[in-house]
Amino acid sequence: MRVGLKMQEAHVLIFGNPQAGTPLMIASPLLALDLPLKVLVWQSGDGRVWVSYTSTAYLATRYSIPQELTGNIAGIDGLIESTLRG
């Protein structure tokens, strides 16, 4: 539906692994608000491209994810960073 507004270029990448995410949501059901994980790739008004996502450290703290389960999503930060470096 068109609303007569122009929005900057933006794409949301959604990814997850039920085998890794389900135990996390069992331990902390509210984490389902942020799973599957998402990455926003967007262009600012000056033409620069940005990549934004919620860090796994923040998710672990926000939802009190047990230490033994944080490894289920801990690799995501490094994956995103290494992908950006090419």
Image (cartoon, rainbow, N blue to C red):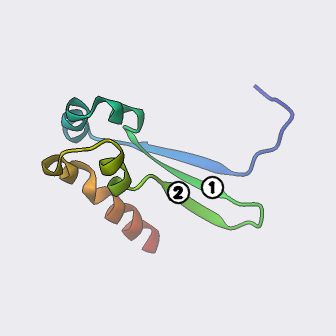
Q: Quadrant of the N terminus?
A: top right
The answer to whether any part of residue 33 appears in the image is yes
How far across and how far down the image is residue 85, in percent? 44, 74
Q: Residue 17 falls in which quadrant of the image?
A: top left
Q: Which three-letter amino acid code belongs to the residue tagged 1?
A: Trp
Q: From this view, report whether residue 24 is shown above or below residue 42.
A: above
SS assignment at label 2: strand
Asked if disc 1 and disc 2 are in contact, CB closer than 8 Å, the reply is: yes
Q: In the current view of this chain or complex, which residue is farthest to the right?
A: 4
Q: Residue 55 vs residue 70: left or right?
A: right
Q: Which residue in the rendered view is the most extreme toward the top?
A: 1
The amino acid type of the residue labelled 2 equals Ser
Query: Which residue is drawn at the image coordinates 26% and 56% (left, top)?
Result: 74
Identify which residue is drawn at 30% across, 49% down. 60
Q: Nearer the viewer, residue 61 or 68?
A: 61
Residue that label 1 marks? 42
Q: Position of residue 29 (x, y in %)?
A: 29, 29
Whole-percent x and y of residue 8? 74, 51
Which residue position holds label 2? 52
Image check: 28 left or right of 55? left
**Quadrant (top left/top right/bottom left/bottom right) for the C terminus:** bottom left
Query: Which image quadrant is residue 48 in?
Result: bottom right
